[in-house]
Amino acid sequence: MPEGEEKKRYIQEKVMDKVCYLPNKQAIFPNLDKISRGGDVNLCLMKFFEREYVDDLVKCDGCKGEKPKGVKADKEFFIYRPPKILTILLKRFKSHGSSLMKNSASIDTLERIYLDDYVIIDDATIAQLQEIYGPGIKEKIENATPDEESLHLFEYRLYAVSNHSGSIHGGHYIAHVKHGEQWYYASDSHTSREDLKRVLNAEAYLLFYERIW
């Protein structure tokens, strides 16, 4: 990898015991087809990051001598560097044969989310966390057990939502944006104050979160 390129990477894909770098991503794209009965943003994240079986054989540098045709493998995504701004796009539009369809599954938007379960904790990340939480955070991370609750180190807060109303054949986009502690509704040139409850219950298409630290 060219020098300096590592700083531009945000999400890693882990195949077997190897970690392969993906193109620069600051966005997550949950597939709503996996969520048939609705849920919330945390369920979307869990489905996006869950381990998947790779149908095709994967060639691995570590074992190509023993199995030159490739090996069976699982694929799993991790966040390599938690971005300052996180975009979550709910995949509401899909192809069905030669036509397009909209998935209107009910997904509850959450004002705060935590990405601790999906972040790779390496030396660079620990050094960054120590600047925020103090030197003792390294020991807390190293001594944490799987059954403990998350330390909530990677907290994100919602600050904007893009919503789509209508069908695949026609519809309208509106936005909710937070300014200070007040939420606002925006539709074309019209804006007005909005209640948080209405923001969280709207049919979200794009979610924008800001890292707390």
Image: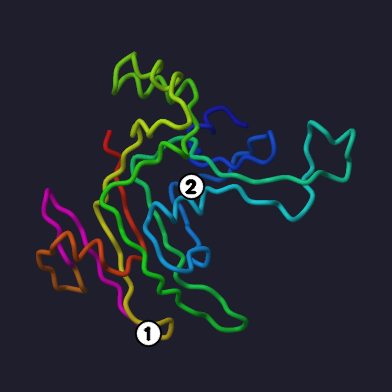
- Which range of residues does the magenta coloring cover? 170-185
Q: Whole-percent x and y of residue 102?
A: 45, 77
SS at mark 1 in the image: strand
Farthest bottom residue in view: 169
Residue at image point 34% right, 14% down: 136
Main secondary structure found in the magenta portion: strand
Q: Label 1: how many residues lie within 10 Å, few (<14), some (14-19) or many (20+)?
A: few
Question: Which quadrant, please, contains the C terminus?
Answer: top left
Between 159 and 1, the residue placed more toward the observer is 159
Residue at image point 35% right, 36% down: 154
Residue 2 falls in image quadrant = top right
Residue at mark 2: 25
Residue at image point 52% right, 29% down: 4
Amino acid bearing label 1: Gly
Q: Which mark is residue 170?
A: 1
Q: Label 2: how many residues lie within 10 Å, few (<14), some (14-19) or many (20+)?
A: some
Q: CA distance from mark 2 to mark 1?
A: 30 Å
Q: Are marks 2 and 1 in contact (CB under 8 Å)?
A: no
The vertical placement of 182 against 116, above or below, is below
